[in-house]
Image: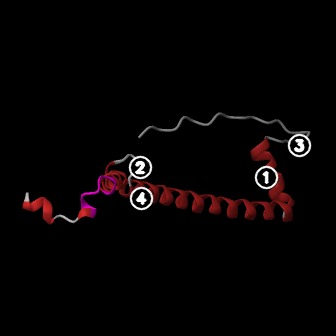
Amino acid sequence: MKLLQQIPAWLKNKYLLTGLVFAVWLCFFDDQDIITTHFKHKSELHKLEKSRDFFLGQIENTKKELEQLKSDPATLEKYAREKYWMKRDNEDLFILPEPPAEKQ
């Protein structure tokens, strides 16, 4: 009985205790808790940054290729023949299928 009298009144408040339990639950035990969410978002951010770097590199390569196509007619012809299977009037075009990829 003496022990209960030594506890301050604000610690006996049921609303405060309920709020504290709720805050602890949200911080540590919930599906959207702070710790798990932080690491999940951090790993997702890392993946997105790698993806961004990859696509920025792809954009640079495409810009270089576009400049070559604009400046050099021989490159333009080579690109058209390889990508779109274009040919001259007096030529025959033979399309060979790619061999299947080897499984590792």
Q: Residue at x 41, y 59 (%)?
A: 38
Q: Residue at x 82, y 59 (%)?
A: 69
Tell me the kind of residue under disc 1. Lys
Tell me the kind of residue under disc 4. His
Q: 10 Å neighbourhood of mark 2: few (<14), some, or many (≥20)?
A: few
Instruction: Please give left or right for residue 83 compared with residue 46 in the image.
Output: right
Instruction: Please give left or right for residue 30 compared with residue 55 in the image.
Output: left
Q: Residue at x 36, y 57 (%)?
A: 35
Q: Earlier in the sequence, mark 4 or mark 1?
A: 4
> Residues at badges 2 and 1 in contact (C-beta under 8 Å)?
no
Q: Earlier in the sequence, mark 4 or mark 3?
A: 4
Query: Which is more toward the observer, 57 or 50?
Result: 50
Q: Residue at x 79, y 60 (%)?
A: 66
Instruction: Determine the secondary structure under disc 4.
Output: helix
> Magenta segment, which residues?
10-16
Instruction: Determine the secondary structure under disc 1.
Output: helix
Residue 38 got which mark?
4
Q: Position of residue 92 (x, y in %)?
A: 82, 35
Q: Which residue is mark 3?
A: 88
- Distance between mark 2 and mark 3 Cα atoms: 63 Å
Q: Which residue is mark 1?
A: 78
Q: Earlier in the sequence, mark 1 or mark 3?
A: 1
> Residues at badges 4 and 2 in contact (C-beta under 8 Å)?
no
Tell me the kind of residue under disc 2. Gln
